[in-house]
Structure formats: C-alpha cells, structure tokens
Image (cartoon, rainbow, N blue to C red):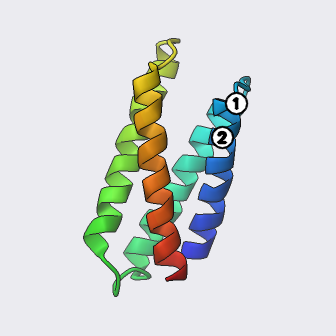
C-alpha cells in the first residue's frame, strides 16, 4: 500500500514541478486531487497497520501537514487569489521533505 501511495505522490510531485515551471489550466486541480488521493492512501495504510513497525507519529505529522497545507492552498483557489511566493515555497519544501520521508518508509 505504501508503494501505491508513493506512486500517486510521485505524480503529484511531478505535476507540482510543472506548475512551478508556469503551466496553468487544470493542473492545479489535478495536483490537489492527486495529493489528496495520496494522503488518503497513506491514511489507509496507517490504519491497516502497514506502518506499525515504523514511526507512526511521523506519519500522523505527514498527514496533518499535508491536509493543512492542501486546505491552505485550496482556500486561495476558492477566493480566486494567487498564493504568495512564501506560501508556495513552504508548501513545496514541506511536500519535498514528506515525499523523501515516504520514500524511506516505502523502500527502507
């Protein structure tokens, strides 16, 4: 289940890189939906006990940070405003750290 989560979030990270390059349209929505799907699979893996031998608190922090960060960025979209560069930088940094942690959980 962690491999599926890693695959989904790999697509999410790739879409995020395309967004940074300046592409728009439906990509922000697809990026958000795939990120939410990856978090949902991670939550299911956590609930099923796939992470029982690993650091469970770290996974809860990843879930909480991903959920709050996604809601923050979605709130900008709902208000039809573009997030500041600092908000995008923090989102990208937290997402990158979480992605690397998930890599360690899935393949370590």
| Left or right of residue 52, residue 50 in this image | right
Q: Is residue 41 above or below residue 55?
A: above
What residue do we see at 52% from left, 48% from top?
36
> Is mark 1 in CB contact (under 8 Å) with mark 2?
yes
Number of marks present in the image shown: 2
Q: Residue 16: horizontal and vertical position, in percent?
A: 62, 40
Q: Is residue 67 left or right of residue 99?
A: left
Q: Which residue is mark 2?
A: 17
Rendering quarter of residue 97: bottom left
Q: Label 1: which residue?
A: 21
Instruction: Determine which quarter of the picture holds residue 62.
Output: bottom left
Q: Is residue 76 visible?
A: yes
Q: Is residue 92 left or right of residue 26?
A: left
Q: Quadrant of residue 9?
A: bottom right
Q: Residue furthest top?
A: 80
Q: Determine the residue located farthest toward the bottom in the rendered image.
A: 53
Quadrant of the snapshot with the N terminus: bottom right
Q: CA distance from mark 1 to mark 2?
A: 6 Å
Q: Residues within 10 Å of mark 2 (few under 14, many from 20)?
A: few
Of all residues shown, which one is farthest toward the left? 57
Position of residue 17 measured from the top left corner of the image (x, y, whole percent)? 66, 40
């Amino acid at each position: 289940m962690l491999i599926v989560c890693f695959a989904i979030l790999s697509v999410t990270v790739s879409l995020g890189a395309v967004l940074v390059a300046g592409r728009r349209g439906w990509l922000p929505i697809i990026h958000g939906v795939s990120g939410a799907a990856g978090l949902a699979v991670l939550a299911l893996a956590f609930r099923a006990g796939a992470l029982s031998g690993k650091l469970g608190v770290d996974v809860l922090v990843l879930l909480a940070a991903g959920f709050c960060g996604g809601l923050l960025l979605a709130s900008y979209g709902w208000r039809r405003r573009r997030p500041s560069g600092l908000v995008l930088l923090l989102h990208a940094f937290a997402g990158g750290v979480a992605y690397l942690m998930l890599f360690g959980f899935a393949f370590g």
